[in-house]
Each structure stands twice: as structure tokens, then as C-alpha cells.
Image (tube, helix red, strand yellow):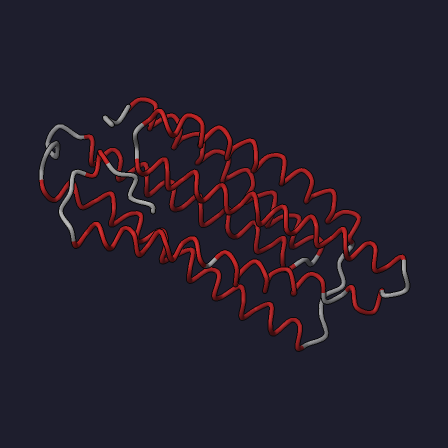
Amino acid sequence: MQCNVALERKLLQFSTFSALLFALLGIGFGLWMGSLVIIFDGAYSLVSLALTVLSLAAAAYIRSPAQKGSESCQKVEPMVIAFKGLVITLMCCVSLSSAIMAIVNGGRDVDTGLALLFGVINVVGCLATYLVMRKYGQCSGSNLVVAESKQWMMDTVISGAVMVGFIVATLMQHIGLAAYSVYADPVMVVVASVYFVIVPLKMMLGALKELRTPVDYRTVTGLR
């Protein structure tokens, strides 16, 4: 499928704006409330922003007339996807380490009411962005946009897990288990980090496989 360059650029720009918005929202709320998992969510959005900018640069390079059809140009796309997978994997590992330390140190006390409000806003926003990226990404014929939509899928599920976790923490406070609710925040980070490291690993391995096997990258998804 031939890539729609104009649509690809618009979708990547849309993803950039969305990532910036959720990064600022997540990190700001997380620092204000002292929530490790919200900071993790915001940090993921910040990493997504940096990687989206990288995707924009890669897309501009790939579509430039000077590079059109060149062998090195065909390798740029899977290289970018592999790098994105590596960065997200490392971020999950760092977050996992921080969460384990928080659990060992007695958990974190978080205002679950405000955290739950943030969770609802974040889930709705991330889901809307993911649906837009997935719907129009299929029409764009761009592997980079497909990779972006996978990032937003991860962000949506992470945000959903955070929201559910804070619902559970709120319930615990109302049924006499408030002493254990302080562990909800870091435990959510542990679960999210362990579970979602699978997706970027698959992204990275799939892209590395394509780098070893010369193919026409316009005809494959590159993210199996």
C-alpha cells in the first residue's frame, strides 16, 4: 500500500500535540499529588512525544526526493521503530525499579479522589487519540503511523489500569483497608511495567527482523 505522505504528516503532528498535552498533564498532576503511577503515565507520554518527533524527522527523510528509492532510506523506518521499542522498554524497566523501591519503603499516600478524576480525563483523551490514529493510520499506509497508534493503545490501557487501580484504592479506604491502599500506587506501576514491556519488545524484534531481511517496507506493517 502506497503511503499517503500528507496524511502521514498530519497524523504524526496530531500525535505530537496530544503527547505533549498528556505529558504536561500527567507529570504536573503526578508531582502535585505525589503519585508515582501518574508520573509514570506522564513520563510515558513525554517519551512518546520525543519518539513522535523522531518519527516526523524520519518521515521527512524517507519521503525526501533525494532519498526516494534508496537502499539506506528503506532501512530508516525499521531502525526508528526498533529504537522506539528499545526506549519504551528501558522506561518500563526504570519505572519498575522505582515502584519496587516505593513498595519496600512503605508505599505512597495519594489523594485517590483527585487521582481518579485525572484517570477519567486521561483515559478519554488517550482513547480518542488512539481511535483517530488507528482509523486514519490504516488509510495512510505508513508504518510510522501504525507504530504511533500502538503507542497510543499502550497509553490508553495504562491509563485505564491506573483509573481502575485508583477505584480499588478508594474502595479500600471505605472498607477499613486504608493501611493497604498506600501500596496501590506503586503496585499499579509494577503491573503496568511488567505487562506493557511486551509490546515494545515485539516492536523492536519485528523491526530488527526486517532490518536483516531486505523487503519493500511500503507493503508490510513492520509491527507484527
The quadrant in which the N terminus is found is top left
- Residue 89 lies in what quarter of the image? bottom left
Image mark count:
0
Image-based side of 77 in relation to 111, left or right: left
- Residue 143 or residue 5, whichever sits in front: 143
Q: Where is residue 36 in the image (x, y as percent from the top left)?
A: 63, 60
Using residue 197 as the reference point, say whether residue 223 is left or right of it: left
Residue sitting at 33 percent across and 45 percent down?
A: 223
Q: Residue at x 76, y 65 (%)?
A: 182
The answer to whether residue 224 is above or below residue 37 is: above
* Residue at horizontal 72 percent and vertical 67 percent from the top: 183
Q: Is residue 213 above or below residue 183?
A: above
Residue found at x 63% / y 35%: 124
Place of residue 72 in the rendered image (x, y in percent of width and height, measured from the top left)? 12, 44
Camera-side residue: 49 or 164? 164
- With 174 as the anchor, is 117 left or right in this view? left
> Where's residue 109, x and y in %?
76, 63
Residue 60 to residue 202: above or below: above
Name of the residue lying farthest toward the bottom: 104
Q: Position of residue 145 (x, y in %)?
A: 36, 35
